[in-house]
Image (cartoon, rainbow, N blue to C red):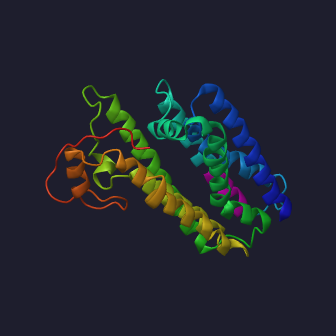
């Protein structure tokens, strides 16, 4: 079990250190957002090299399939969205707040912290690599369903938002159609649901229960730290956003409340 966790941690340290240098040269720490999804692919497949040779275990490859699909799509989506935009407002704020300490604080509080998050969220995969468990159980199929639904919500929400922003006259406007009419953050809901699915797939491993740290971590971050709170703070006091906020569920998809309005908002991720 040791080599699996050590290799994942080492690869993440290497990966994040390289991204730190790239971000430093480009003066754009938001490049780490592009690397977020691929970091899971890099570390999980790297750890797979050190896993026991159990080619017959479908659970391992089910997890690696979903990690690769999810991480690849997310990296491509954020990379395409980032072109020509410069550093994201959150990281620009960090740059202003941190002043002369920007270099070492960026390394520790952005890149290394992101690496730690990836390591913790990857835990169900690493645990299955260490102890694959028996043949597929009902939890594997339920988890795969959660992964599919989460991937659908995240991918479709991102596509709907990108399509909306390409329309003439929509700059600065908020999308209130499609999945965005059921929750203010369908992409965040999809991401959380995806990782609950990954946890369920790994639950049949003898170590699977310890993978609970993964969905709990990502759900907490999205709901309380760097997801919804940070994004919605940007629009606090905007009358049109407040209307949208009042009628639309923050996280879990639900029917809109009251009459339809057309508030304003920017990118949601």
In the depicted structure, whether residue 19 falls above or below residue 59: above
Determine the residue positioned at 47% across, 32% down: 81
In the depicted structure, whether residue 18 falls above or below residue 45: above
Q: Quadrant of the N terminus?
A: bottom right
- Given residues 88 and 97, the one toward you in this image is 97
Where residue 103 appears, as percent x and y from the top left, is: 65, 37
Instruction: Tally the marks.
Output: 0
Determine the residue positioned at 70% across, 56% down: 61
- Given residues 169 and 94, the one toward you in this image is 94
Q: Is 174 one of the magenta-colored residues? A: no
Q: Quadrant of the C terminus?
A: top left
State which region is magenta: 59-67
SS majority, magenta: helix
Where residue 60 appears, as percent x and y from the top left, is: 72, 60
Where residue 173 appears, as percent x and y from the top left, is: 27, 36
The answer to whether residue 64 of the structure is visible from this angle is yes
- Given residues 94 and 156, the one toward you in this image is 94
**Left or right for 184, reference 33:** left
Where residue 20 appears, as percent x and y from the top left, is: 67, 37
**Residue 129 lies in quadrant:** bottom right
Determine the residue positioned at 68% across, 62% down: 123
């Amino acid at each position: 079990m040791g080599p699996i966790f050590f290799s994942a941690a080492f690869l993440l340290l290497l990966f994040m250190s390289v991204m730190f240098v790239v971000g430093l040269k480009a003066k754009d720490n938001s490049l780490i957002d592009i690397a977020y999804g691929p970091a899971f692919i890099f570390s999980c497949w790297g750890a797979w090299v050190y896993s026991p040779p159990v080619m017959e275990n479908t659970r391992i490859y089910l997890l690696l399939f979903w990690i690769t699909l999810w991480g690849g799509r997310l990296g491509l989506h954020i990379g395409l969205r980032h072109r020509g935009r410069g550093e994201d407002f959150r990281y620009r704020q960090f740059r202003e707040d941190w002043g002369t300490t920007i270099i070492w604080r960026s390394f520790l509080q952005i890149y290394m912290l992101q690496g730690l998050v990836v390591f913790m969220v990857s835990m169900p995969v690493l645990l299955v690599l260490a102890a694959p468990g028996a043949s597929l159980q009902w939890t594997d199929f339920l988890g795969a369903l959660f992964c599919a639904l989460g991937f659908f919500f995240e991918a479709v929400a991102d596509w709907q938002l990108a399509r909306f922003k390409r329309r003439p006259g929509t700059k600065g406007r908020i999308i209130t159609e499609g999945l965005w009419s059921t929750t203010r953050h369908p992409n965040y809901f999809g991401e959380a649901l995806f990782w609950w699915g990954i946890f369920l797939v790994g639950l049949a491993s003898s170590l699977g229960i310890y993978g609970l740290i993964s969905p709990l971590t990502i759900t907490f971050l999205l709901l309380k730290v760097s997801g919804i709170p940070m994004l919605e703070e940007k629009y606090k006091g905007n009358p049109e956003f407040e209307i949208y906020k009042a009628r639309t569920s923050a996280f879990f998809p639900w029917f809109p409340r009251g009459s339809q309005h057309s508030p304003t908002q920017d990118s949601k991720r």
